[in-house]
Image (spheres, coloured by chain):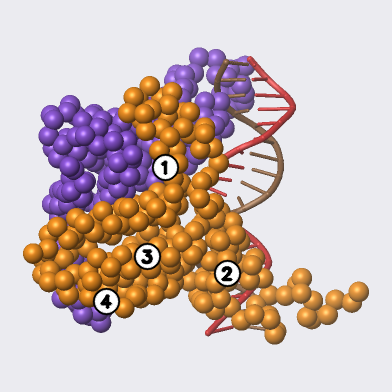
Chain colours: A purple, B orange, C brown, D red
Amino acid sequence: MAVTSTDRSARRGRPPKGAAQLSREAILDATLTAIDTLGVSVVSMRGVAKILGVDAKSLYNHVEGKDDLLDAVAEHILGTVVIPCRTGNTREDLRAIAHAFRAGALAHPEAATLVLTRQVSSPAGLAPTEAVLQVLDAAGFSPDESVPLLRMLVATLTGTLLRELQAGPAFGVGAGIAEREAALTTSGLPFLARAAARIARFDRQAEFEFTINAVIDAVLIRHR
Amino acid sequence: MAVTSTDRSARRGRPPKGAAQLSREAILDATLTAIDTLGVSVVSMRGVAKILGVDAKSLYNHVEGKDDLLDAVAEHILGTVVIPCRTGNTREDLRAIAHAFRAGALAHPEAATLVLTRQVSSPAGLAPTEAVLQVLDAAGFSPDESVPLLRMLVATLTGTLLRELQAGPAFGVGAGIAEREAALTTSGLPFLARAAARIARFDRQAEFEFTINAVIDAVLIRHR
DNA sequence: ACCTGAACACCGTTCAAGT
DNA sequence: ACCTGAACACCGTTCAAGT
């Protein structure tokens, strides 16, 4: 019952021999697990700190703020993407990069929005971009030709993955394909009504394949 | 100095003859101007209420909550898109729809993220989709063929507009083209370094034209 | 060097009480 | 029918005080 000088409830300043030493990396890890668990929209500095058994304000010794932290998460995930080796077949090489990017992004579905939405400028984050430029160069495109093509590829990839994410965090079909089909059928829009069954269903893998192949077609058209 | 029964500071309940009668539409308008002024990330129920000279909690009589409100803003903007008449030229018709969509989205740049990011299911919001399906039908595509093509077009459009928005809210080039070019040049990634000058520059209109044309090429390839 | 107490200026939302 | 007071359970962040 005696209150000693190490009484935790009265402590202030650095803990005498606190268990986990706080670090930028530890904070980043905790943030990622918080995002995976609760979703990115619910994540908070205070919540991350709680995971680490620390006060929220302590985080500011290692991180500029919440925005900086979320940028770091995006960069971390992007750094996770393993760029495939080139085969010399332009179509297959572009496909492989797209699939690698998708795999990296979907490894943390709740964090994927960050990757797709935030501007990343670190070298690690730029590796996929570099890889695309390399493939286009090997295919014989000049930089003048490559950059717009790169932008189209990135835009399509981004858009496709965003759709995929909001189409349903769960695998395959989300809740209510029948409901969606019914809503479309009765929308009063004839072409949507006619295509309702096909629109209501969504095969993530197949849609990704189709879109990425089609957009690569658009690239290869410009090939001499 | 006398405190009467109409003393405002002690009032409770509906104002005797308050100026503006609150309505869903008025709330929506106020929200849109708040977004245009402050940016979507800063908008709050309390802020919107202040614009209307009302307490934040009053909004809940006309709106389900913040999420519902932002959905409504997205729908409103989408309902603003004027679908162009068909000309019979598939390429031109698809281009025209894309441009109409872009114009609608960019009319409120700070709100555009909502339009591109949220799932919209109201008939008004689905009009552009219906228009694309109609053009593809007129071009001779079956619904089975049209739906994946529609998805590719939407994905590319979404991705392109998102990039355009984050590339710079200001018109044309944002701050620091030279800085970005320098960063890319010294990134240690050779292909990025070589294309640095082209990547650092970004002509919104030209990039949009290129991408949309290229992706329509991918559609028309599949034309018999 | 690093952590926290106290503090500031905010959030979204519920619900009963008022008119 | 519609608005608000009181209240709840949160936010991100600063800064001086502590070790």
Quarter of the figure with residue A184: bottom left
Residue positioned most to the front: A224
* First of labels 2, 3 by sequence position: 2
- Mark 2 element type: helix
Mark 4, residue position: B87
Under circle 4, the secondary element is: loop
Whether marks 1 and 3 lie on the same chain: no
> Chain letter of disc 1?
A
Label at residue A118? 1
Residue A151 horizontal/vertical position (percent): 33, 44
Compute the Cα span from label 2 to label 3: 27 Å
Marks 4 and 3, the one that precedes in the sequence: 4
Q: Nearer the viewer, mark 2 or mark 4?
A: 4
Q: Quadrant of residue A191?
A: bottom left
Which numbered disc flags the more N-terminal residue, 2 or 4?
2
Residue named by callout 2: B30
Mark 1 vs mark 3: give the one in front. 3
> How many residues crowd mark 1 within 10 Å: few (<14), some (14–19), many (20+)?
some
Q: Check disc 3 and report the residue beneath it.
A: B99
Disc number lying in front (2 or 1): 1
Identity, as a three-letter code, of the amino acid under mark 4: Thr
The Cα atoms of the two marked residues, 2 and 4, are separated by 38 Å
Q: CA distance from mark 4 to mark 3?
A: 15 Å
Instruction: Specify the subunit that label 2 lies on.
Output: B
Rendered residue at 32%/53% (across/down): B210
Q: Amino acid at mark 3?
A: His
> Answer yes or no: do the residues labelled 1 and 3 have beta carbons within 8 Å?
no
